[in-house]
Amino acid sequence: MAVRPLPLQACIGFGGTVGTGLILHPDHKTLIYPLGTTIVLRDRKDLTKQEFLQGHNNRVSCVTLSRSGKYLASGQVSPMGFSAPIIVWDYAGRKLLHKLILHKVKIQGLDFSYDDELLASCGGQDDCKLVIWRTKTGEAVCGSPTPLDCAIALRWASKTRSILVTTGVRTINVWSVDDKSRKLIPEQCDVGRKKRTNQCVIIDERDEFMFVGTLTGDIMQVSIGPMLFRAGGPKSLISGGCLCVVFTPSKDLLVGGGDGTVNLLRLGTLKLIKSVMLIGGVNSLAIAEKGANGSFDFYAGTSFANMYFVKYDGFRNEMAATLMQKCHFNKINDIAFPHNYSDLFATASTNDIRLWNLKEMKELLRIQIPNLQCEAKDSINQECFCIHFMPDGKSLISGWSDGRIRAYGPQTGKLEYTIINAHCSAVTAIASTWNSTRVISGGIEGNVRVWRIGSQSHNMIASMKAHVAAVSAIAVRKNDTECVSCSIDGSCMIWDLTRFVRNNSMTASNFFQAVNYHPDESQILTTGTDRKITFWDAYDCQAIRLIDGSLSSEMNCLDITPDGEGFVSGGVDREVKLWNYDEGHCYFVGLGHSGPITKVKISPNQQKIVSVGEEGAILIWDYRKPISNSPPDATKDVKVVRPGSPK
């Protein structure tokens, strides 16, 4: 039976580590940016209006748009030794035109010629090739190894397709391109004693000068004809290096710095005019609109997955930034929905917990730990491993890498209480009883502990020890008499929550990663590193059925629908799979993550599926009933006639 694609409804996130990945289309209506394996086309005024281009099977490493806006090209990262394809898209038709394969491992840079006729691509340090392609046919015109080392950035001239510039470590090369005779001839620029790692480059509209941004933090002005260094600036170097550079409408330079600054430099003198500080290294800039007196608006993308809209007032020389989109910049460890409420969900990651509106796809609340509450010297090292909404909706409980359990008000984010030293090193799993009076936690050392939560106090009732490694998940029965915990030691334990002893256990040659009760609580579902999804009898803990969750990679997460008809899984293969529970058959597969999927949840109203991964992306899928859409069998309408009866 054919497996159908799971419809991707929305994405929350931004691939901030992709250099110059944030692009504004010439129609000034659509923002284009990568997120994992997907390229997102988003209405700049409405976050909920999104379209997706999906064709890559690994993380997108670079994106470029043709000058006319007709074509879009994207490259990806591939495993060592494998080809890294480039995809050319028809922007208007939202369809794949060509898949270009010559490079290996990583596509470092892409750029279209001024007339959209040619596309230049360069590979990363494992490839070190420069290739010229014909945009309309996808034919490779010519290619050459890049001199000395791989090219970090490349740029076509503004008025001709016979000149191409590449920059790298201590090199700036001007290439003479003859697409008719299929020749590429490089010449190296002389910049004197300035030995720089050249990270970005732009060329003026008259093709006289190029402006190269360096890791040192300065801009070098180099003439294209004589290929000589002309000027440099600013006097005060930009900390963290120059990550991107663009021209403003008044032909000054706008430079994104690794220290989070956006710097406006006067073109003639390269003198700093104005700067503004953002969160994260600024590696994408896109000019939006031009105003009077040298004013303009632009978008900025940072390495912390933040997207800003910045206004520059030329009359007052003021620059003001507004945060317009934000997401986690690191691995997301857990998702949680409130009990019987589907418009809100929470995610846990490095440093913080964030609450999101599912309909509007906006961050509602961010809960962070101040430095004073951290035992570690640097709060950036604090990791929230697990979160859970109490069934009464009054608090959001969380487990952290410093061994503490923290509870917050879900509406205000105010800290309600902290259980210090709940576990010796880290709290890796957390759940609560359905009457909201107890919290069950699992630690990295293998203990399962029960805590009484009162209005004024909290204390440990029991500590149950049977696991010898980290507890990865906990599920509680609806009558609050039992819970089941799974561990990476290869065991699942069923605990009595009245006598606090072990009732039963399940073992396998497996690092268990997820465990769930079926809604009728007659069966238990588990998965882990053995790539199997196992159905267990909840009474005698015998395995009923084993199915292959993945043919190649370990499984990380499971979630069962409230009606028990289906379940969803995710793992290292980066596929969100929707299964029929009784049949054990996968009906839908969702592709969009570029890293291992860490958690997946079905909304309580069974309308959406939310998945998160190690790349920091939140993907929202439309739920589909896991049943066959095949036409009814014609034999079902055939009437059986007994022998000898009249026709």
Image (cartoon, rainbow, N blue to C red):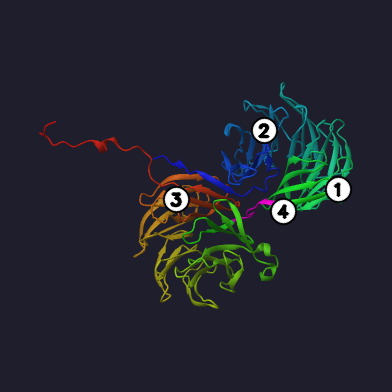
Query: Which region is colored magenta?
Result: 322-331
Disc 2 or disc 4, which is closer to the eye? 2
Callout 3: helix, strand or loop? Answer: loop
Whichever of callouts 1 and 2 sits on the residue coming sooner in the sequence is 2
Q: CA distance from mark 2 to mark 4?
A: 29 Å
Q: Is 359 colored magenta in this rendering?
A: no
| Residue 533 rendering spot, x and y as whole percentages | 42, 54
Whichever of callouts 3 and 2 sits on the residue coming sooner in the sequence is 2
Q: Is residue 104 visible?
A: no
Disc 1 or disc 4, which is closer to the eye? 1
Q: Badge 1 is on which residue?
A: 272
Q: How busy is the neighbourhood of tag 2: few (under 14 within 10 Å), some, or many (20 plus)?
A: some
Q: Residue at x 57, y 40 (%)?
A: 52
Q: Badge 4 is on which residue?
A: 280
Q: Badge 2 is on which residue?
A: 69
Q: Residue at x 43, y 60 (%)?
A: 516
Callout 1: helix, strand or loop? Answer: strand
Q: CA distance from mark 1 to mark 2?
A: 32 Å
